[in-house]
Image (tube, rainbow, N blue to C red):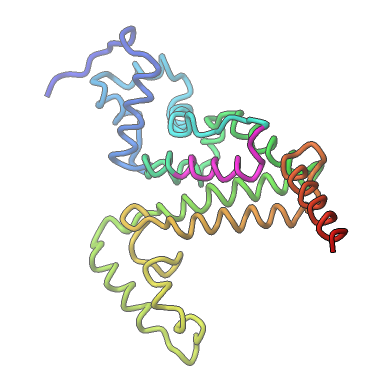
């Protein structure tokens, strides 16, 4: 085994982040360390600190930024706020599915906040403003969007146990099949449909069995909830223009009758 080299001056921050993401993809978040990244690059760990002074936390934030790079759609006035959010939801899931071991970093570690681009936050707020949200309501709506989007993908990609995976899956299948009909009648009525595709009950993770249909449904339900939460969008939004056009058409039809 070759001895690590210092190579501090030859390294770049971009090379370090690329190697760090490769380590995360291979070993997962719990096993991630600067020593592993250094081995990946063939250098001593001290060489990394020269480029990443904050150590592990800063590097994890950089990984979060790399995973989410290019996820935020363009804030075009020609796109309705709900279509913009649907596009963001799809882009986010595609990006995280490409690096599933980053899901718990983005969904359950505050350190990732340092790596999330301001453009994503700004874009979500831009969409919600166009939907008519303001004041404290826009904070609640923003949190609903982020919690729903990040939370769904994080849970979807939660991994099955590393040890005795087949035995655990068989045990979970038997557990679902053995649920008592008298005690849990609604669950038993829907168990066949829920089994492999429902949070809490399933025995395969979203890497092996993607939850595409449920994710699309989640996005549609969330958008519907946002529309119901603020039924009257501001006059400058595309949704308001659509509503005005429908109103005029309805009035014309009524007068025709």
Judging depth in this view, the residue of 84 and 58 nearest the camera is 84
Was residue 248 drawn as part of the magenta stretch in this picture?
Answer: no
Location of the C terminus by quadrant is bottom right
Residue farthest to the bottom, as pictured: 182
Compared across the picture, whether 27 is left or right of 140 comes to left
Displayed quadrant of residue 132: top right
Residue in the image at 79% along x and 52% along y: 249
Query: Which quadrant of the rendered structure holds the N terminus?
Result: top left
Residue 211 coordinates in the image, percent (x, y): 42, 57
Total tally of numbered discs in the picture: 0
Please tell me which residue lies in front, 156 or 254.
254
Q: Position of residue 11 (x, y in %)?
A: 33, 13
Q: Is residue 97 left or right of residue 250?
A: left
Image point (47%, 29%), residue name: 69
Q: Is residue 77 above or below residue 205?
A: above
Residue 228 in which image quadrant: bottom right
For this view, does 4 lie left or right of residue 83? left
Horizontal and vertical percent for residue 233? 79, 46
Query: Where residue 47 sits in the image (x, y, percent)?
Result: 34, 16
Q: Is residue 211 above or below residue 69?
A: below
Q: Residue at x 88, y 59 (%)?
A: 255
Q: Is residue 90 magenta?
A: yes
Tell me if 229 is positioned left or right of 53 in this view: right
Name of the residue lying farthest toward the front: 256
75, above or below 5, in the image: below
Q: Main secondary structure of the magenta part?
A: helix
Q: Which residues are magenta?
A: 78-93
Classify residue 19 by image quadrant. Answer: top left
């Amino acid at each position: 085994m070759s001895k690590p080299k210092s190579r501090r001056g030859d390294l770049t921050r971009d090379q370090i982040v690329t190697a760090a993401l490769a380590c995360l993809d291979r070993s997962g978040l719990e096993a991630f360390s600067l020593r592993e990244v250094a081995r990946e690059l063939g250098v001593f760990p001290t060489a990394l600190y020269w480029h990443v002074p904050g150590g592990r936390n800063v590097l994890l934030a950089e990984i979060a930024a790399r995973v989410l790079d290019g996820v935020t759609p363009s804030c075009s006035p020609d796109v309705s706020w709900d279509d913009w959010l649907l596009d963001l939801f799809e882009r986010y899931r595609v990006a995280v599915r490409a690096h599933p071991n980053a899901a718990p970093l983005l969904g359950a570690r505050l350190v990732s906040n340092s790596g999330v681009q301001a453009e994503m936050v700004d874009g979500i707020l831009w969409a919600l403003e166009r939907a008519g949200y303001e004041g404290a309501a826009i904070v609640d709506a923003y949190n609903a969007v982020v919690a729903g989007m990040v939370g769904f993908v994080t849970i979807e990609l939660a991994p099955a146990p590393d040890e005795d995976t087949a035995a655990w899956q068989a045990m979970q299948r038997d557990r679902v099949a053995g649920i008592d009909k008298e005690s849990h009648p609604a669950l038993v009525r829907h168990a066949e449909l829920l089994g492999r595709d429902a949070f809490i009950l399933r025995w395969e993770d979203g890497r092996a069995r993607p939850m595409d249909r449920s994710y699309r449904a989640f996005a549609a339900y969330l958008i519907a909830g946002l529309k119901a939460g603020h039924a009257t969008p501001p006059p400058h939004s595309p949704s308001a223009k659509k509503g005005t056009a429908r109103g005029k058409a309805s009035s014309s039809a009524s007068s025709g009758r």
